[in-house]
Amino acid sequence: MADKKYRVLIAKPGLDGHDRGAKCIARALRDAGFEVVYTGIRRSPEEIAVAAVQEDVDAVGLSSLSGAHLQLFPKVLESLKKHDAADIPVIGGGIVPDEDIAILKEQGIQAVFTPGTSLADIITTFQSVCHK
């Protein structure tokens, strides 16, 4: 990684209580040299946006296994915009059908990871969006 230590926020929007994957990603990013803020489970899009602004993060990573990604991920983008933080890139992950990935990217999600994506690919993507 470059000289700058990137700061990222990992969050679980909505009612999804399954956080093993999010914690695994947070740990991998930490081990790769990122500063990681983990919000915990069951956060509203507004809470996530406020935390991202308060923590002055370089990127936000969202995890959803509940099937609510098409509703929740765009709401996080809207909340970031509302807080004049639309420039913070957002990456999503979880159980996301292939046909929904294109929709999320059209709405502004930078990348979407599904089960089986390597940690190396995820780290590289975070490095890429933070470096912009």
Image: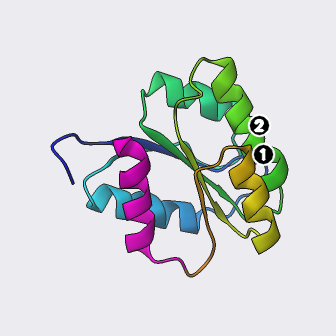
Q: Residue at x 66, y 24 (%)?
A: 81
Question: In the displayed structure, does residue 10 sit left or right of residue 105?
Answer: left
Q: Could you say where residue 47 lies in the image, as x and y percent from the top left?
A: 66, 30
Q: Is residue 122 magenta?
A: yes
Going by the image, does 26 lie left or right of 15? left
Q: Please give the label number shown on residue 72.
A: 1
Residue 112: image location, x then y, percent: 62, 62
Q: Position of residue 62 (x, y in %)?
A: 61, 51
Q: Is residue 69 magenta?
A: no
Which amino acid, mark 1? Leu
Residue extent of the magenta highlight = 117-132
Kindly indicate the quadrant of the structure image that contains residue 93: bottom right
Q: Is residue 104 visible?
A: yes
The disc label shown at residue 90, or none? none
Give the Cα separation between the discs numbered 2 and 1. 5 Å
Residue 44 seen from this side: no
Would you say the magenta stretch is mainly helix, strand or loop? helix
Q: Is residue 35 left or right of residue 70?
A: left
Q: Secondary structure at mark 2?
A: helix
In which quadrant is the N terminus drawn?
bottom left
Disc 2 marks a residue whose amino acid type is Lys
Q: Residue sitting at 76 percent across and 73 percent down?
A: 98
Residue at image position (84%, 47%) is: 71
SS for callout 1 = helix
The C terminus - image quarter: top left
User: Where residue 75 sits: x, y (%)?
Assistant: 77, 37
79 up-or-down from 42: above or below: above
User: Can you tell which quarter of the image residue 84 is in?
Assistant: top right
Q: Dot 2 corresponds to which residue?
A: 75
In front: 94, or 128?
128
